[in-house]
Amino acid sequence: MSQAIELQKDETFVLNVGPQHPATHGVLRVKMTMDGEYIYNAETVLGYIHRMHEKMAENRTYPQYMPNMGRLDYLSAMAFNHGYALVVERACAIEVPERAEYIRVLTVELNRISSHLVWLGAYVLDLGGFTPLMYCFDDREQILDLLEAVTGSRLTYCYFRFGGLYNDIDDEFISGTRSFIKRMRKELKMYAKLVTGNIILMKRLKGHGMIDYDMCKRYGATGPVARGSGINYDVRKNEPYGVYDQFDFDIPVYDEGDSFARYMVRMDEIEQSLRIIEQALDKLPDGEVNPKKKPKMIKPPPGDYYAAVETARGNFGIRLVSDGTNKAYRLKLRSPTYSNMHLFDEACRGMLIADALAFMGSLDLVIPEMDR
Amino acid sequence: MSIEQKTRDALAPLFADQPPPEPPEPAGADESEKQAGPRPNGIIQQDYSARGFHLDVQIKSEQIVEAVKIMFELDYFLESITGVDWLKDDQLEVVYDFARYDFDLCRTVLRTRISRSEPSLPTITSVYTGASWHERETHDFFGIVFQGHPHLIPLLLPEDADFHPLLKDFKV
Amino acid sequence: MGTQNIPESLETVPASFVQFAIADKLINLCRANSLWPLTFGIACCAIEMMCTGAARFDLSRFGAEVFRPSPRQSDLMIVAGTISKKMAPGIQTLYDQMPEPKWVIALGNCAISGGPFVFEGQYGIVEGADKFLPVDVYVPGCPPRPEALIEGIIELEHKITGWRRWPKVKPQWRDTPEG
Amino acid sequence: MSLTLLNVIVAVFVAICFVGANAAYLVWCERKGAGFYQRRPGPMENGPWGLLQPPIDGVKLMTKQLLIPGGVDKAIFMVAPVLAMFPALISFVTIPFSSNIVAHPIDVGVLLIFAFAALGGMSLLVAGWGSRNKYSMISSVRAVSQTVAYEIPLMITTITVILVSGSLNLSDIVNQQLGGFWNWNIWPLQKQVGFNLLMPVSFLILFVCSVAETNRAPFDLGEAESELVAGFHTEYSSMGFGLFFMGEYANIVIGACLTTILFLGGWACPFGDLGFFPFTHNVGWFLLKIYLIIFVFIWIRWTFPRTTIYGLLNLSWKYLIPISLFNLLLTAGLLKVF
């Protein structure tokens, strides 16, 4: 629904959707020049939570840098652990035992569901409904209990090791996950009734915040933002890593490109992750979790390596340039929200401020992952 | 014809004026890959499972916009722009990562090397608008000036920042 | 928690014509029991703060449920996350905009001392909220559990009123006999 | 001092106490209701079931520093909260709680309520403009266009009821509906209503308009927390914000009273006057109906997300006003025929 009205430049005022604003869920600042309630132009300012992850990589050894992965995108931290472990295993050619691969898939998918639940709660909170936030956080607490029993932390996981895992899962975790899957299926039906079927929500999301294929391609948007605009791109399917090729799950793709499409993509992804977890639980092989002979000191051969994994927000890539010592020479973190948010400036021209903030919610932002 | 071959042929004219490169190196990086000096310009086939990308292309810094246009026509999307500071070669390297949305997998990497004394590079925001933040960030961290960039002010560092933290000789 | 050595609340105000000690106590009690926090989450600790406000660890039991978005109506600033040098002036203005009786809780190691992001070549973060804000209660952890934030708020109430709501739980290992 | 003046002063004092207590404990009900809907207990620690929470909040708000930010239009800034609270108090003078409990039965009670309701709408504009803040300015423009858009259908539906009952005095309107719930105004097939089928529809329109009038729930565009920081009362600190807060709840009580009197038969007992105590027309039934309607207000708030400004205005200008106009003409015509 692009606004046909033309906006006069002279009578605009600059509104700071400032670093502290309920809808930005973090410290992101958007300078909007507004004409009344219509946005004439928007310019995003980042850097309010720049935590120098890439500089730290250069004076931390490889195992010391793993906790940073949990603090980049704290909502789907397990996938970031997976990315970092993958790039170092690819560089040092370390073999990962079968059981460890399955547990990795299990924990990453559980973490993806908890990330989508936080997004759902925060998104409907942006649209004005306060109750779904509480239901989503209540379900998420179940996942956090499961993962905390195994990894020890609720949010910023540091569970993966190069070639394996920190510790093995016990059968109490397995029975807990099975009961969680049953409960989550029931909750998904309730969410469909309470939120998706809500006429006010439909009116606010359908037809707003349009993103087309060309904009995705020019900005490099990936993840649910791209899948909402008809792009069938998911790193788990396009570049299968780990044991993802042994599960059958499909990638929800909607091609309307509006906020409602992105909303439905994420809701279906919760269902798909539940399917993956079920298959992972059924096919879980037993055996060791860490490789027999672990390399004493991780020293990747000189050269540069690249690995990409699918996090809840898109394709997270790591470019590792190593010079043979035990510290990375240069480590570049390609964060998905960075590219997804970049198209906000162009997409929100001519929108109302209420629709623009709803559109920003549909992009599912985690600001420290953008600022790195 | 596989997408890798198509990309190779599309990028080949960039090196028309160069002597044909000697036979491509063996796939997969052997341990003692000590290159004498900086690598000659050209396309190298890499083993995906070992390095994570398929084509590794090094070009001169003036040909960047032309190469990126070719990649845009071949329907790649720009993943990221990385800066690397080779202090011992007194050179700054800028790496462009490209990937594809569809299922024929071909991750391509474009590299250029510029001298540390006057680090400047043409901008590619005219082709990929998404590159403007990547370039601003690389400018923040390495001080590389991207000519023609519409809005080259610090993105992640404070507005008045004049230091470039990721350079190897950076002192607080 | 940093509040062990707070003075007992003044029983008698020296040399004033009318004693308002009892009224002060009542006002302090009311202020302590209805602390309205400012929604100001910066990073990972903000998610734990939302968990504290959510269903399981309900912060509204203590009257602190109303997360006011505007600094004018809030009287407790929970600094939840890393303070970067670019954000520090913003936090300072927010703190100045809050009306008087205001308190600050530094939630998480980043707000206490810069946490995991302190290394010798660091250029971007302010190492701790107490560099430019008067912090009342420090809640350690990275990120601290929701119970720790609730304990921090109870500790703040202890500091305001001088009276602790629930008995302070002694950590378990002290009681077990040695050896 | 003549008797009626003393009577009015006492009545206004009682109304202030009623509104004050009501506003305080409605906040408590809202927070406990929110907790109930959201799987959490709500205020528990301060007093049994958190019952002491409202007075604690009140004392805290009173003892906070009343901060007038610089560059603010001081006079308007200070008047706005009073304007938000004042109309609700005055309207209580004419609300008949029971046949004899009424502050001052004015013959044009309905007119007085609407006169002061417009004043309430103006307070939002004055607050938004006075506090020199871009967010409050946007929210005040939204809030005023909303109150104007929803006052018209409110008045038209009230006129239909006045047409039916023939008098502007609220007590007369209720006296017409005494005797059993079947002859309340809400039911369509009645002699006094001229067999007009659209009466329940006008009840719904009145209810929706009173929700929108008080800036609540699906229509809380004025104080849209997640978009406009805190709407028109962004710059108000302690008791300025407190007055807005209580003004909102006082307006909710006024809206509920109006709906009850016009459609649900005021203090009429649903089973007619059966003589023994609980089943006579007394104030208990009036309060019961008010609190039921307020419960529905709270219920709506915690289930629905917020509509957009154009959706809100479309609803009023394109749907509510035409329907209520048609209903008015239909009632007038039917009254002429029967």
Image (cartoon, coloured by chain):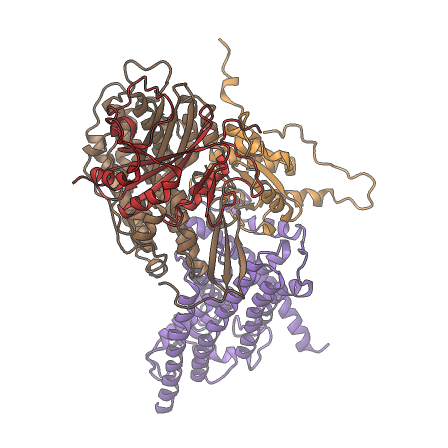
Chain colours: A brown, B red, C orange, D purple
Q: Is A219 left or right of C141, judged from the image as shown?
A: left
Q: Looking at the image, which residue is at 51% across and 77% down?
A: D170
Q: Front-most of B90 and C75?
A: B90
Which residue, as the protein is rendered here, is positioned at the far left?
Answer: B1
Q: How many marks?
A: 0
Q: Is residue A172 above or below residue D294?
A: above
Q: Nearer the viewer, residue D104 or D324?
A: D324
Q: What is the quadrant of the C terminus of chain A in the image?
A: top left
User: Looking at the picture, how far across and down is residue A25, in whole percent?
Assistant: 46, 46
Q: Position of residue A39 (x, y in %)?
A: 46, 60
| Image quadrant where residue D334 sits | bottom left
Q: Position of residue D293 (x, y in %)?
A: 44, 64
Residue name at image x 36 percent, y 74 percent = D201
Residue D39 in view of the camera: no
Q: Nearer the viewer, residue D57 or B24?
A: B24
Residue D1 visible somewhere in the drawing:
yes
* Residue C156 in the figure: left or right of residue B168: right
Residue D5 image position (x, y, % from top left) = 68, 76
- Quadrant location of the N terminus of chain A? bottom left
